[in-house]
Amino acid sequence: FTLILTHNMKNTDYNWTSGIQGIQVDSNGMVTLEYILKNEITITGTPKSNKGNKVTYRFSLQKWFLPQGDFQEAWSVINSYCSD
């Protein structure tokens, strides 16, 4: 998903970090989750200009959906998704 800022702020004006391995945030504010995380996640944007306040976005995953396209995995892995 992509973070959307308000008040005419631009994602590219911030350096983004989550501080959590497995979560990537690019310079456009696009968030990529590499695996399921059950704890609250905080993403922080620090102004590149060093002026103004940091912005934060906090969330917790409630559901994790897998694509129904061409997806192959071992039965034990697929079965564990259904039990979570």
Image: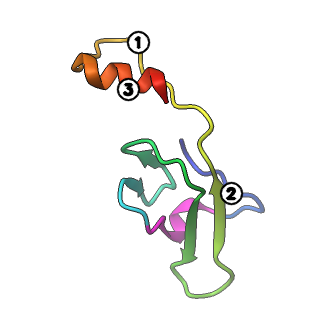
Q: Residue at x 38, y 42 (%)?
A: 35
Q: Earlier in the sequence, mark 1 or mark 3?
A: 1
Q: Residue at x 65, y 67 (%)?
A: 56
Relative image position of residue 46 (x, y in whole percent): 55, 76
Q: Earlier in the sequence, mark 2 or mark 1?
A: 2
Q: Is residue 19 above or below residue 62?
A: below
Q: Residue at x 68, y 81 (%)?
A: 53
Picture quadrant of residue 76:
top left
Kindly give the residue lying farthest to the right in the view shown: 7
Q: Residue at x 33, y 20 (%)?
A: 78
Amino acid type, residue under disc 2 in the picture: Leu
Q: Is residue 25 left or right of residue 60?
A: left
Amino acid type, residue under disc 3 in the picture: Ser
Gap between marks 1 and 3 measured at Cα: 17 Å
Q: Nearer the viewer, mark 1 or mark 3?
A: 3
Picture quadrant of residue 8:
bottom right
Q: Label 2, on which residue?
A: 5
Q: Label 1, on which residue?
A: 68
Identify which residue, 30 or 23, lies in the foreground: 23
Q: Label 3, on which residue?
A: 80
Element type at mark 1: loop
